[in-house]
Image: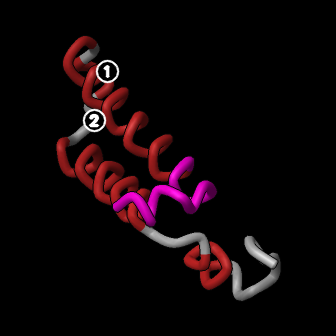
Amino acid sequence: MKDRLQNWFTTIIGALLMLTAVGMYIVDKFKPEMDIHVTEIGAVAVLGYVFLMAKDTLLEGMFMNIFKVKK
């Protein structure tokens, strides 16, 4: 896991997505009229975990090598 956290781009994206999932959960509890489903919160949390554990080369693959993360 320590090796994965050295990939800063995906770590930042993953951490932001995890914080978003926590924020969605809090908003759902205090403002029920927003109607955020548990499935949506879970999907954002899982996506955040995937980015948190991924290498930076995942971004290169997603954008078909348009930009290089590492030289």
- Mark 1 Cα within 10 Å, few/some/many (few <14, many 20+)? some
Per the image, the residue denoted by label 2 is 36
Q: Nearer the viewer, mark 2 or mark 1?
A: 1
Q: Residue at x 47, y 56 (%)?
A: 5
Q: Residue at x 39, y 64 (%)?
A: 53
The image position of residue 3, as x and y in percent, is 44, 65
Q: Residue at x 28, y 14 (%)?
A: 31
- Check if residue 7 falls in the magenta segment: yes
Residue with the most extreme front position: 2
Q: Secondary structure at mark 2?
A: loop
Per the image, the residue denoted by label 1 is 27
Front one among 28 and 2: 2
Q: How many marks?
A: 2
Mark sitting earlier along the chain (2/1): 1
Left or right of 56? Residue 29 is left
| Bounds of the magenta segment | 1-12
Give the prevailing secondary structure in the magenta stretch.
Answer: helix
Left or right of 23? Residue 36 is left
- Mark 2 Cα within 10 Å, few/some/many (few <14, many 20+)? some
Is the C-beta separation of discs 2 and 1 under 8 Å?
A: yes
Q: Secondary structure at mark 1?
A: helix
From the image, which quarter does the N terminus lie in? bottom left
Residue 63, picture quadrant: bottom right
Q: What amino acid does circle 2 point to? A: Ile
The image position of residue 58, as x and y in percent, is 56, 77
User: Residues under labels 2 and 1: Cα distance?
Assistant: 8 Å
Left or right of 64? Residue 31 is left
Q: Residue at x 20, y 19 (%)?
A: 29
The image position of residue 6, as x and y in percent, is 54, 58
The image position of residue 64, as x and y in percent, is 70, 87
Q: Is residue 33 above or below residue 44?
A: above
Q: Is residue 39 above or below residue 33?
A: below
